Amino acid sequence: MAKNVATDTSEEEKLLLAAKVANLVQIERVNLVESSVEYDPFSELSGEVELSNSTEYVVDKERSVVFVKPRFAVVAHVKRGRPLTITADYLLVYSLVSFEEITDEHVDAFAGFNGVYNGWPYWREFVQGMMSRLGVPPLTLPVYRPARCGFMSIAQPVRRHSLTDPRQEKAAKKLSGKATKKKRPKKPVKKKSSPKRKTR
């Protein structure tokens, strides 16, 4: 039976518990197991985006394996019409060297932290590709940053981001301008020839 990640442990404790398991595991595979997209092409996006995630896991001690299933969601709000919603569930399979001295609390913290952290790059690529296929403004998900004490909150709050960032657009224009700017060829410098001396 899948277990939901607990949220009543302090950030410092989660970090220590997850780190102990992280030193004993190896990621075997990452699979996209379910995804969904809801989009009304006649809606007008407002530019505001909400990100959220949750995690559940299953432990198989006989095979020394932990199955972690993070679920990601992004909702792009609209000025009118139905919001754009993209969700994806991934299955991350970890093999453990040993379950000795590893409790349910250790696995719980590890699943909530490493499961989301390891699955985030796959989720970012999925969203970026899907937004392109839908023909809407591109969205690059931010870095999944740790919260205080160097640990990312397992009970991840809803985070808001903009589809269009004026600073990024300005920087992109500068970069593209530099890339396309052609260097002017240098004009050849004519060397003045010294007058020949007449010999008597």
Image (cartoon, grey):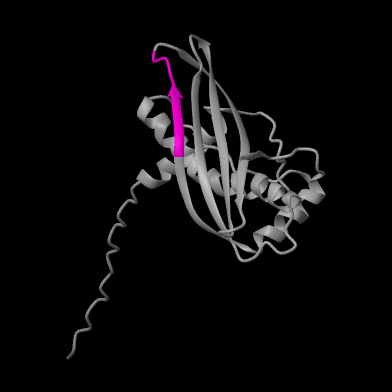
Asked if residue 141 is among those painted magenta in the image, a careful observer would answer no
Q: Is residue 185 above or below residue 43?
A: below
Asked if residue 38 is among those painted magenta in the image, a careful observer would answer yes
Is residue 165 at least partly visible in the picture?
A: no
In the image, the segment drawn in magenta is: 33-41
Residue plotted at (81% across, 50% down) = 12
Q: Position of residue 153 (x, y in %)?
A: 72, 41
Q: Quadrant of residue 147?
A: top right
Is residue 157 at least partly visible in the picture?
A: yes
In the rendered image, the quadrant that contains the N terminus is top right
Residue plotted at (55% across, 34% down) = 72
Q: Is residue 185 above or below residue 124?
A: below
Residue 149 is left or right of residue 62, and the answer is right
Viewer-side residue, 157 vs 33: 33
Viewer-side residue, 189 vs 80: 80
Residue 2 is left or right of residue 82, and the answer is right
Of all residues shown, which one is farthest toward the bottom? 200
Q: Quadrant of residue 74?
A: top right
Q: Tell me the chief SS of the magenta region.
A: strand
Of all residues shown, which one is farthest toward the top? 80
